[in-house]
Amino acid sequence: MAVATRDSVFAGPSVYERSRIPSPVPTMLQVDPAIREQGDVMQVNFGPNHPSTHGVLRLVIDLNGERIVGLNAVVGYLHTGFEKNMEAKTYWKAITYAPRIDYVSFQNNELVFVLAIEKLLGIDVPAKATWMRTLLCELNRLHSHLIWLGTGALELGAISMLWYCFREREAILDLFELVAGFRMHTRYFQTGGLAEDVPVGFWDECRKFADVMPARIDDYEAILDNQAIFLERTKGIGLLSADDALALGQSGPVLRASGVNWDLRKREPYLAYDELDWNVPVYTAGDVYDRYKVRLNEMRESVRIVQQCLDGMPQGPWIADDRKVVLPPRHELHTSMESLIHHFKLVTEGYRVPEGEVYVPIESPRGELGCYLVADGGPRPWRVKFRAPSYVALEATATVMTGALVADLIAIVGSLDNVMGEVDR
Amino acid sequence: MTYDGLPGFLEERHAYGETTVVVERESLVDAALTCRDELGFNVLADIAAADYLGWGSKGVAGYWGTAGGRDINAPGSWGLQRTPASKPKRFSVSYHLLALRDEPSRIRLQIWCDEGEPVESVISVWPTADWHEREAWEMLGIRIESHPNLVRLLTEDDWEGHPLRKDYPLGGEPVRFSDAE
């Protein structure tokens, strides 16, 4: 159960041997006819607006006594057609849609779309922007895990956790407000770099936060790991083996709790992650408790990354110097006709992105967040598709719920860390 | 490494550091099995379908650019830099595969199909394809064959049409006002 040190993808023994993925529909648990014949099956609607469904998730469950014998996840209540809308907007405007898809890890969603555009454009991003993106994405990971930890523990009866976690979450949102002017959906990542330079007061405030945070994470762990009820309700339930997790396309903390040492920040490095010193927490029991441990230790690693970013932050420009893509400096607009024309053209018409298709995966707090972007050479994306990690995590609900009791349902669904905005898009 | 040994191999493209392997629609499942069992692509990361109706020509829903360039009488029609390469068929379905191992690799397995042409389900190869295929059918009308549970996922059960098609209008749902009864 310790953090894996050897550099291999698979760590530890399998959680269980034979596959538990239901058949023929892998995402739906169908009631065994033998149980059905006994006539003691009751169908219950869980959600769509139950407070512990993290949004509007509806689970149709079949109960035999207290045991779950059938399950079907019904999603789509938050479908807002982001991908369709983005096709009608210039890249410039479409960036604002990306963070709203997953409103809890907004900065990572913004990043993946900007990275996809930059991959097609082939634009060089200055070092300061790359490091600042790394820093903000890790703050965002802390923010996301704090919300997960606070609400997840609240649902299991540890009410005080919500207040502790939201105290730190507020501090992170204040940092976002300081740097970008907005608490959420900052739209601070711009094609080619950052939208603005980092304000001078940010570094001190961020360091204060990074200094105090490790002790706070120790507090969370002390509260929950010494809490018998929490341990009883999380250990040994919601099992998922490594083989089943891979077959179901799982990623992120769910995969790492099943003994798969897989983190895109290490395996397919992007931003500045390969220049920093940090570890990937891997646990092997594949249960709800280990998913909690993975996320808790990831928060520690995120704080380490934030501290290293503060120490090693390069100086220099914060956005690429490419006048066909990047807005000219504000002060030039008063003196330079060329800059004024560029500004006008970029804002009204947008920049053209070369024809092509790319798939950019990053490690969001929930796992592999991918952006498939098709460009036709015009100023609007032809097709945008987000590979949402919690959409895929929800596909595993039927498998992890095999033989579970109805009382464990909330703990198990919560441990998959779904954000319905991202699932439904 | 080359992929020309895949069943139904048509084309291999390299662009932006990514590999796209196009195979025939009919041999998709065979190619997928070869990818999984012999080439080690043990994870299906995503299935992304795209509609190329009107690609490089006069715009349709949500698209204002034209191949002829900018029309000063039509605000918002700033055309393309050049006419993009034409596509073999209307729809593409891209299977983003990941070989999750110590030296990871990714490819995009791609097929092309026209309206109504059946695409075999790959659930038997990667169970995670379930919802991705339902979404491809629901949003773009890709006809997925032998899927055990092909019902609408994100839109309502009685929704008509496939919203992410290019001929599906953006917005504009008819609203019934109470005084129009």
Image (tube, helix red, strand yellow):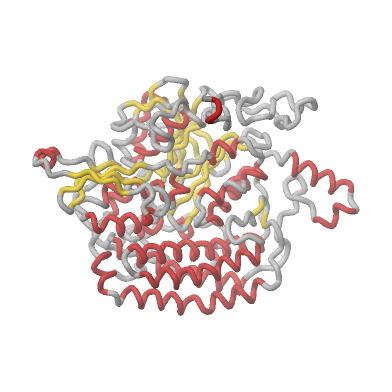
| Residue found at x 38% / y 32% | B157
| Residue found at x 18% / y 41% | A31
Which percent across, then down, holds residue B22? 46, 30
Residue B38, quarter of picture: top left
* Residue A321 in the image: above or below residue A160: above
- A340 to the left or right of A76: right
Taking depth in this image into account, of A237 and A125 the one nearest to the observer is A237
Which percent across, then down, holds residue A51? 38, 56
Which percent across, then down, holds residue B123? 31, 36
* Residue A114 in the image: above or below residue B111: below
Which percent across, then down, holds residue B43? 37, 45
- A173 to the left or right of B96: right
Residue B51 in sight from this viewpoint: no
Q: How many marks?
A: 0
Residue B31, quarter of picture: top left
Quadrant, the N terminus of chain A: bottom left
Residue A289, quarter of picture: bottom left
- A358 to the left or right of B58: left
Taking depth in this image into account, of A400 and A47 the one nearest to the observer is A47
Residue A393 in sight from this viewpoint: yes
| Residue found at x 37% / y 47% | A48
| Residue found at x 58% / y 42% | B16
* Residue B65 in the image: above or below residue A122: above
- B24 to the left or right of A178: left
Taking depth in this image into account, of A129 and B34 the one nearest to the observer is A129
